[in-house]
Amino acid sequence: MTTSLPPSSPPASPRAGHPAGTSPTALPAKDTALTWADPARAQAFHDWLHGLTPTHGLQPETVRLASADASFRRYLRVDAADGGSRIVMDAPPAQENCRPFVQVAQLMAAAGLRVPEVLAWDEAAGFMLLTDLGHQTLMDVLDTTQPSANLPLYKDAIAALLAWQTASRPGVLPAYDEALLQRELRLFPDWYLAQHKGLTLSPAQQATVDKAFASIVARNLAGPQVFVHRDFMPRNLMAPVPGFSPATPAQALGVLDFQDAVYGPITYDVASLMRDAFLTWEEDFVLEVTIRYWEQARRLGLLDFDGWSEDFGAFYRAVEWMGLQRHLKVLGIFARLTLRDGKPKYLADTPRFVHYVRNTANRYRELGPFLKVIDEVENLQAASGFAYGRM
């Protein structure tokens, strides 16, 4: 049965993006023709979409692929009689649970973010009709040759992130706890080292890795806890839509790919934003944006912990430790996508994450033995420090 839901987001432009999926996201350059591997699912989709056509003014003959991601979920675009378009989420229920998407969309809308509105949902079949937030992600419009030219867009991203964080409350989303942080870290030795590189760590190396993981988790759990998007990066933020006037700065960018949101370290999303899976900025631009976030977050009372609100350096070090956990996790995810899911293109970005890991580990003396293990498995020389040096 198809359930129509009440609006769950602020009014959006009629041509408002393709939700991305589980990190990382694969986006085609433009909409492409739609194909189905399962004829029965194709027929079920046809019947469902045509059933919605009178109510939502859809034009079923225009349906095409908008984006696909690293999960089993994909997104389709269909034109509507009002001149705009809508997005359909195709999420086979045997592999994908859409309830978190619906829950987090409602939480983000209540926090004042611009997110897809759920117009109709057939939970049993795994089809969902959404508003369309546009055709360009933030990644599509960034000028990578002139970092400072992108500052207005990053200010908008900060506004959305702070609106999300200030709406936080415990007990609503799953906890980003020790078990989950450790489980994510294990992807690095289990998939990147063992499966991808074919390496078995020596007992001494394993002990070093375990000790480093314990330190990473302990540091990241020590700080303030908030709602965490968990993949807050340019590919999951939609560029401003021409002609759309946001009610607040937090609505200037659309927010997607939020279904894995949790309640956890406040440093996670800003680390994700500035240490992107597919884009590397020079340190001065990373610092500039992170400082702007820090200045606003401390005024909002979000950073009242261990001197963070008085000392940017203390906060920035915490961001680095959080980023280290994410980088190690993503190395494992990219290897798993290649070896288990047959998506080898992600491995092309692993050098970026090895670079992130080595530079962060080089800054902190207690991670020196861990850096040595990384250099051994990568056949690299010791990294050179920069910014704050070794702590």
Image: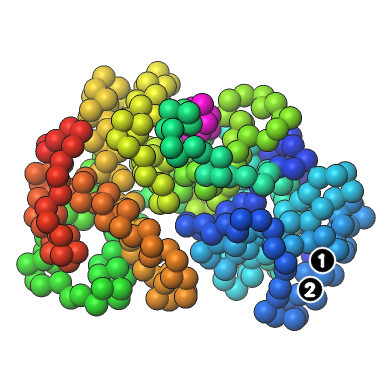
Range shown magenta = 152-162
Residue that lies at the very extreme toward the front in this rendered image: 145
- Where does the image place residue 349, in percent across and percent down from the top left? 38, 58
Determine the residue positioned at 60% across, 38% down. 239
- Which residue is drawn at the image coordinates 67% and 79% (left, top)? 37
Residue lying at 14% horizontally and 44% vertically, measured from the top left = 384
Residue 322 in sight from this viewpoint? yes
Left or right: residue 119 versus residue 325 is: right
Q: Is 74 above or below relative to 100?
A: below
The correct choice, above or below, for 351 with respect to 284 in the image is below
Give the residue type at disc 2.
Ala
> Which x, y percent locates residue 72?
57, 68
Image quarter in which the N terminus is found? bottom right
Quickly name the residue at label 1.
Answer: 48
State the residue position of label 2: 44
| Front residue of this view, candidates 204 and 288 | 288
Q: Is residue 255 left or right of residue 324?
A: right
Q: Quadrant of residue 251?
A: top right
Q: x%, y% of residue 355?
A: 26, 51
